[in-house]
Image (cartoon, rainbow, N blue to C red):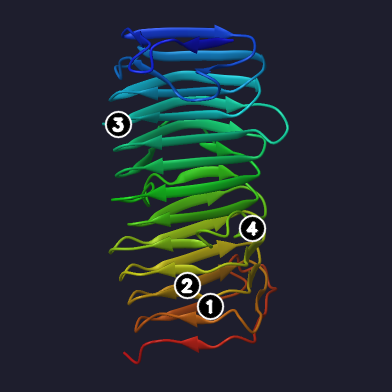
């Protein structure tokens, strides 16, 4: 175990390497405060080789070259500035990786057996290079003052459940089946704002069990092999588009409301010759 003895700043260096068997943290299970660099090639490398948690707080901008646990949670945050995470891996049953940046967050490859939580005080940006930015059973995405990724550089994920609360847009491309919801009762579904879009696509089936709500005027675009809508999909004034290679189905709670924009439901998006649209929810679109 490695733990700090000075709660203010335990370690100060442009390049820090920490290795322990049963945990890296302060006190009993609190964040260990450090001050390291955000420059390329510098920053933090931390490894927990046996069962134990890894909890780090940097005082300002910092870069995580690698943060790894064999069997334990990871928590990374900072007091001010940006965080760049090149690699973070939380191993072990039920492990969670939680990364919260005071300002901008850039992520390379982050994985956990159970859940990954990423939060940008401003924006979240995927680093170029990794084919998959997040691998986990569950992913929660939060931006407090900006977009999570972009249309030209989306988050590439392999997750089963997705939720998020974003002041701006969310751009995400997933591999496999994906459910919106099923993680937290505090912030249900996916929420966006401003003029950027909520653009979520997956290679498998897409199931909306909790709301997809854009409070601004951006568009909502949902794409999957098949799409099932059992909760409201809405925007404050943009367009709503559902594109499925196979069927689009909706339950009684699966209302679609564009707030004045257009609504597009398209089955057989891949023109393979199959696909139906059947919904019990209400559809409200603009008249223009």
Q: Pointers 1 and 4 in contact (CB under 8 A)?
A: no
The numbered mark, 3 or 1, whose residue comes first in the sequence reads 3
Callout 3: few (<14), some (14-19), or many (20+) C-alpha neighbours within 10 Å? many
Whether residue 130 is visible: no
The residue at the point 50 percent across, 80 percent down is 256
- Label 3 to label 2: alpha-carbon separation: 34 Å
- Label 4 to label 3: alpha-carbon separation: 30 Å
- Label 1 to label 4: alpha-carbon separation: 24 Å
Task: From the image, state whether disc 2 or disc 4 is nearer to you.
Answer: 4
Secondary structure at numbered mark 3: loop
Task: From the image, state whether disc 3 or disc 2 is nearer to you.
Answer: 3
Task: From the image, state whether disc 1 or disc 4 is nearer to you.
Answer: 4
Q: Pointers 1 and 2 in contact (CB under 8 A)?
A: yes
Callout 4: few (<14), some (14-19), or many (20+) C-alpha neighbours within 10 Å? some
Q: Which mark, residue 265?
A: 1
- Label 2 to label 4: alpha-carbon separation: 23 Å
The residue at which mark 4 appears reads as 182
The residue at which mark 2 appears reads as 241
Secondary structure at numbered mark 4: loop
The residue at the point 31 percent across, 30 percent down is 79
Looking at the image, residue 53 sits to the left or right of residue 8; the answer is right
Whether 200 is drawn above or below 84: the answer is below
Q: Which mark, residue 82?
A: 3
Front one among 214 and 244:
214
Q: Which mark, residue 286?
A: none
Query: What is the x, y in percent for residue 85?
Result: 43, 27
């Amino acid at each position: 175990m490695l733990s700090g003895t000075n709660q203010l700043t335990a370690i100060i260096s442009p390049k820090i390497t920490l290795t322990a068997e049963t945990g890296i943290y302060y006190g009993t299970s609190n964040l260990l405060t450090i001050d390291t660099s955000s420059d390329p090639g510098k920053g933090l490398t931390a490894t927990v080789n046996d069962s134990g948690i890894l909890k780090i707080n940097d005082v300002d901008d910092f870069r995580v070259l690698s943060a790894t646990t064999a069997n334990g949670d990871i928590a990374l945050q900072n007091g001010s500035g940006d965080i760049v995470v090149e690699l973070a891996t939380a191993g072990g049953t039920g492990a969670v990786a939680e990364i919260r940046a005071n300002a901008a967050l850039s992520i390379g490859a982050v994985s956990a057996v159970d859940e990954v939580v990423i939060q940008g005080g401003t924006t979240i940006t995927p680093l170029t290079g990794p084919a998959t930015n997040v691998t986990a059973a569950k992913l929660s995405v939060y931006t407090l003052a900006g977009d999570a990724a972009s249309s030209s550089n989306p988050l590439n994920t392999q997750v089963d459940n997705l939720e998020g609360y974003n002041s701006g847009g969310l751009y995400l491309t997933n591999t496999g089946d994906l459910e919106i919801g099923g993680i937290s009762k505090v912030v249900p579904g996916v929420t966006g704002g401003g003029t950027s879009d909520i653009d979520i696509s997956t290679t498998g089936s897409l199931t909306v069990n909790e709301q997809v709500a854009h409070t601004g005027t951006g568009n909502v675009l949902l794409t999957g092999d098949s799409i099932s809508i059992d909760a409201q999909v809405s925007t404050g004034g943009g367009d709503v588009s559902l594109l499925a290679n196979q069927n689009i189905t909706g339950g009684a709670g699966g209302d679609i409301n564009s707030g004045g924009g257009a609504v597009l439901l398209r089955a057989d998006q891949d023109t393979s010759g199959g696909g139906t649209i059947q919904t019990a929810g209400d559809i409200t679109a603009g008249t223009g």
